[in-house]
Image: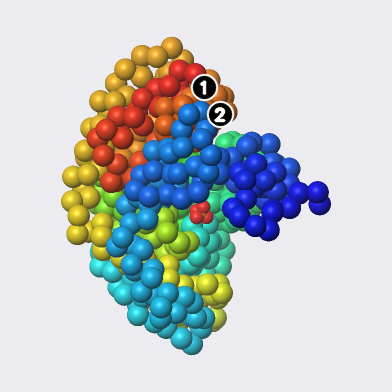
């Protein structure tokens, strides 16, 4: 091709962009690329350093935590040291027939801090795969105990569980993300989306709707899978923990397993260490990812109860037939253990409450902007809901002009800042959200 990187010296951002556009897929992007992504040179604390000045800015405050993950910020000395130490021992070894301290330590830590009753840990390499593993566990459990007809899944509308095959089948069927595959994906059972509002009084009609649907399909349902309390990529909506509790009760009553996808909500984001705690329940299977490694490396985890593990292990095929090459990766496990340890030794709940208050105060005036339907805040998550689809390019430009990195999408401008974001930076994130909502 005409475009190559010059052999000497650092490439000019323009050169990188030309090659990026020609060769590199981006999330939900076309080929060749249509957007001109910003080239990031380095990142430290809550700041992304750009390779070239953009709208007068060389540094941007990160309002996104790299999609919920970088809770401690970038280039953190404790996390850097954990990676460095592990790197000096080994970066990876296969997990078949071998084990190592980082994986065992992490697994034990996750069992200790997640809701009581979750005892076994599968260390997968991405959130979507951890959901695949969770669903596979549930289906295999029922096969193993002689109920192979229980292989459908129930979820509520408005959800998002990942981009691989089975997770796609439980994403919002009307959300547009996976419309292309409707009719090809396994047909699951969809309840209505939960009524909005974390603190809203639970709607009895809705609870009845959930219970009836589970009762009606119980004979064919392996599991219910939902995101508790916050539906993320499907629309950034919050709902009452009472609905999660109602699912637990209905699942118990009708012999259906409950999977909670806490890939986005886990590790403090909603104000509880895990969103399941708001509901006071233990799921049969729990998916974790994103903030698990503090955003350093790719790793996710699927936890399950003894009942599921025993069911599988006593079945006709007494193994869980899943084993990715990078399962239990020592570097990722070491930094995950350090990241969770760092979180727990800090007043994470205090920091999340501080950010929650900062977002509420900082976005108070945004709610009355023309074109804004509502502002909602829960924990370290702030959402400006517009009345129309956002102009992504214009909204992003408005935020960058304020020195902040945001990624508005659909009809929303939203932020989930790192927990270490200081008050001044948080105020700037709010100002950028305001500007993005006004101009996007
Ligand atoms: N479930 C939820 C709730 C998520 O937010 C995501 C990531 N957006 C996933 C699953 C998929 O995780 P990953 O992108 O790491 O595959």
Left or right: where 420 falls relative to 192: left
In the image, 229 versus 339, the foreground residue is 339
Q: In this view of the protein, can residue 430 be seen by the observer?
A: yes
Question: Would you name the residue on which mark 1 appears?
Answer: 440
Left or right: where 231 falls relative to 18: left
Q: CA distance from mark 2 to mark 1?
A: 7 Å
Question: Would you name the residue on which mark 2 appears?
Answer: 392
Relative vertical location of residue 221 with respect to residue 143 in this rendering, above or below: above
x 22%, y 50%: residue: 348
Q: Residue furthest right?
A: 1
Q: Residue furthest top?
A: 370
Relative vertical location of residue 203 with respect to residue 220 in this rendering, above or below: above
Q: In this view of the protein, can residue 259 be seen by the observer?
A: no
Cβ of mark 1 under 8 Å from ligand 1: the answer is no
Q: Secondary structure at mark 1?
A: loop
Image spot of residue 288 (x, y percent): 40, 58
Image spot of residue 315 (x, y percent): 49, 79
Q: Residues within 10 Å of mark 2 (few under 14, many from 20)?
A: some
Relative vertical location of residue 217 with respect to residue 413 in this rendering, above or below: below
Marks 2 & 1, CB-CB < 8 Å contact: yes
Left or right: where 201 falls relative to 258: left
In the image, 402 versus 396, the foreground residue is 402
Image spot of residue 8 (x, y percent): 65, 57
Image spot of residue 201 (x, y percent): 27, 31
Cβ of mark 2 under 8 Å from ligand 1: the answer is no
Q: Secondary structure at mark 2?
A: helix
Mark earlier in primary sequence (2, 1)? 2
């Amino acid at each position: 091709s005409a475009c190559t990187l010059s052999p000497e010296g650092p490439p000019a951002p323009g050169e990188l962009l030309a090659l990026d556009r020609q060769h590199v897929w981006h999330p939900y992007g076309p080929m060749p690329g249509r957007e001109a992504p910003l080239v990031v040179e380095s990142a430290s604390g809550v700041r992304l350093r750009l390779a070239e000045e953009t709208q007068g800015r060389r540094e941007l405050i990160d309002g996104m935590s790299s999609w919920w993950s970088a809770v401690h910020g970038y280039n953190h000395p404790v996390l850097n040291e954990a990676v460095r130490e592990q790197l000096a021992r080994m970066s990876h070894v296969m997990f078949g027939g071998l084990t190592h301290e980082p994986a065992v330590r992490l697994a034990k830590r996750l069992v200790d801090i997640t809701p009581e009753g979750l005892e076994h840990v599968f260390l997968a390499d991405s959130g979507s795969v951890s959901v695949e593993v969770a669903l596979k566990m549930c289906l295999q459990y029922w096969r193993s105990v002689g109920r192979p007809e229980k292989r459908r899944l129930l979820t509520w509308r408005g959800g998002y569980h990942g981009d691989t095959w089975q997770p796609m089948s439980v994403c919002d069927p009307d959300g547009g993300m996976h419309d292309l595959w409707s009719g090809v994906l396994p047909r699951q059972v969809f309840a209505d989306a939960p009524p909005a509002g974390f603190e809203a009084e639970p709607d009895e009609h809705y609870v009845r709707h959930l219970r009836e649907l589970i009762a009606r399909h119980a004979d064919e349902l392996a599991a219910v899978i939902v995101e508790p309390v916050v539906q993320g990529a499907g629309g950034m909506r919050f709902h009452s923990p009472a609905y999660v509790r109602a699912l637990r009760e209905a699942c118990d009553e009708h012999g259906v397993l409950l999977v909670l996808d806490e890939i986005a909500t886990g590790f403090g984001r909603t104000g509880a260490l895990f969103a399941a705690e708001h509901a006071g329940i233990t799921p049969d299977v729990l998916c974790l990812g994103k903030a698990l490694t503090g955003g350093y490396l790719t790793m996710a985890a699927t936890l399950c109860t003894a009942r599921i593990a025993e069911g599988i292990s006593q079945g006709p095929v007494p193994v869980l037939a899943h084993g990715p090459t990078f399962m239990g990766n020592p570097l990722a496990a070491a930094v995950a253990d350090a990241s969770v340890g760092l979180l727990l030794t800090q007043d994470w709940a205090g920091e999340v409450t501080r950010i929650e208050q900062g977002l509420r105060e900082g976005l108070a005036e945004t709610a009355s902007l023309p074109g804004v339907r509502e502002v909602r805040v829960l924990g370290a998550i702030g959402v400006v809901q517009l009345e129309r689809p956002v102009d992504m390019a214009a909204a992003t430009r408005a935020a960058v002009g304020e020195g902040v990195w945001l990624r508005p999408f659909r009809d929303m401008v939203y932020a989930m800042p790192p927990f270490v974001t200081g008050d001044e930076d948080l105020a700037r994130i709010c100002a950028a959200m305001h500007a993005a909502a006004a101009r996007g």
